Amino acid sequence: MLDAPLPHRTSELPRPPMTARERTQLEAFLVLRRNPLELWGPAAYREEILRGRFLGREQIMINAPDAIRHVLVANHENYGRNIGTVRVLQPVLGTGLFLAEGEAWRHHRRTMAPALAPRTMPILARHVVLATEEAEVALGRAAGGRPVDLLRHMQNLALTIAGRSMFSLEMAAFGDELRAMLLRYALAYARPGFLDLLLPGSVRSPLDVGRAAFRKEWLRFIDRLIDARERQAERAPADRPRDLFDLLAAARDPETGAGFDRAQLRDEVATLIIAGHETTAATLFWACYAAARLPEHQERIAQEAAALDLSPENASAALKRLPYTRAHLDETLRLYPPAFLIVREAIGPDTIGGRRIAPGTVVSVSPWVLHRHRRRWRNPDAFDPTRFLPGAPAPERFAYMPFGAGPRVCIGAQFALTEATLVLARLLRAFRIEPFGSGTVVPRGFVTTQPDRPIRFLLSRRAH
Ligand code: HEM
């Protein structure tokens, strides 16, 4: 039955309304705060390069594959993180890998890469399955005919997996506090204010004052996490690195011989915990949402998973036998890319697609726009996992990039895909998921791509 063709029906899932005309600067600013996914009008989804000025700054948005390759790969050293991103993320991520630049970035990246390389995936798969088994029990208990908040469950699950697999740390004692702090930060400080965008980077904006106070509190929290991890290490001394934490603690700069000090360790732990769970949780939420709205896809995943040994020891080997589950996720990441906008700022002058670029120009590549671009995709708004099944033509280069591209491509892409594929296969094998109520939510860009309001689902156990 697995080989039976899908009913030929492409399916549209909700997206925010698209503006029909260009916005004024004030409108654009208000939309940026309300829902950045509503920023772009029809031209953005049709054109290759768009230019404009926003709050006194040159802006360029690129959809053309050659231009994207130029900025993110060929001449990436000329494009750093922009001031808006730094203002918003620095208080939580510090100078960890995401925000590090230059030689420091290269050293951090080299240190962490081995711990997240494909060969470590079997160890990750084991953690994923063990944590998912616990989540299945919790979901079974929580469900019992009552609607369930799946976003919340996916956030807890992804956090548990990130804590255990990277830092051998149980997050149960920290999870609620961590999520409450992140939510408080996101509501108060993550949306850029007017002066955040207008003032030069060297001048503090009014929101920066609150951000700095938050950072002190946040660092105390991360310190407690590290203390808990170090206490565990005392109880179970290891003669070789057990996890990413040990690798970071043992790393030495090849040139200076210096190790990561406590401040750097804090920033890396914060970066990996946040980048490593929030995005994957959003992916799993939207994958479940699509499965609930489109039951024929859900049944196909459940069938594919039913035949496999997805136990902690064997799940890693089963991954390649989950092509449909993986295609469902790839399509989820196309239509609901958690990282909906990648922004850079030109350091020196340059030329992109024949256009002169002045230093300070803000250059954006939006996976959200690219993945729905009219020139790159057939039926761009339809949810159709068959685009990603083995044998289907590969998407055009730089038309599909949920994990970015070039030297700063997501270091956790393998991790995220392994985790999301196994969790989705296990969950849909265990439960049938249906929307509760109207089941309509609109995606909203709020740090990552999130549902615009809480939504619940009805879960029923599948008979085996
Ligand atoms: C579905 C899940 C994920 C998505 C969609 C995603 C997306 C991205 C994207 C688009 C970038 C590049 C940003 C840019 O170029 O400005 C990025 C970078 C990064 N991601 Fe992910 N990510 C995911 C999961 C993870 C996981 C699981 C981890 C950690 C284990 C992680 C850690 C990072 C880090 C540290 C960077 C910065 C890399 C650098 O600058 O060298 N991400 N991610």
Image (cartoon, helix red, strand yellow):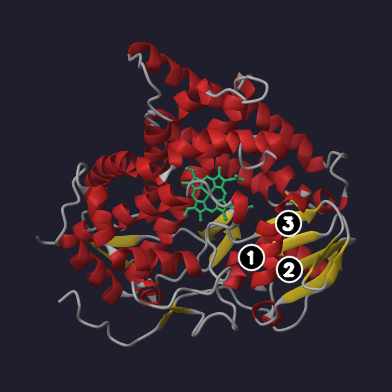
Q: Please, what is the three-letter code of the amino acid marked with disc 3?
A: Asn
User: Residue placed at 69% from the left, 58% from the top?
Assistant: 74
101 relative to 335, above or below: above
Secondary structure found at label 3: loop
Of the 4 image quadrants, the one containing the C terminus is: bottom left
Q: Please, what is the three-letter code of the amino acid marked with disc 2?
A: Met
Which x, y percent locates residue 244? 45, 31
Q: Please, what is the three-letter code of the amino acid marked with disc 1?
A: Ser
Secondary structure found at label 2: strand
Which residue is nearer to you in this view: 198 or 193? 198
Which x, y percent locates residue 40? 69, 73
Mark 2 vs 1: CB contact within 8 A: yes
Residue mark closest to the camera, 2 vs 3:
3
- Residue bearing mark 2: 61
410 displayed left or right of 210 = left
Which comes sooner in the sequence, label 3 or label 1? Answer: 3
Please tell me the numbered disc located at residue 366: 1
Which comes sooner in the sequence, label 2 or label 1? Answer: 2
Tell which residue pokes out farthest to the left in this image.
464
Which x, y percent locates residue 217? 63, 27
Location of residue 434 by image quarter? bottom left
126 displayed left or right of 158 = left
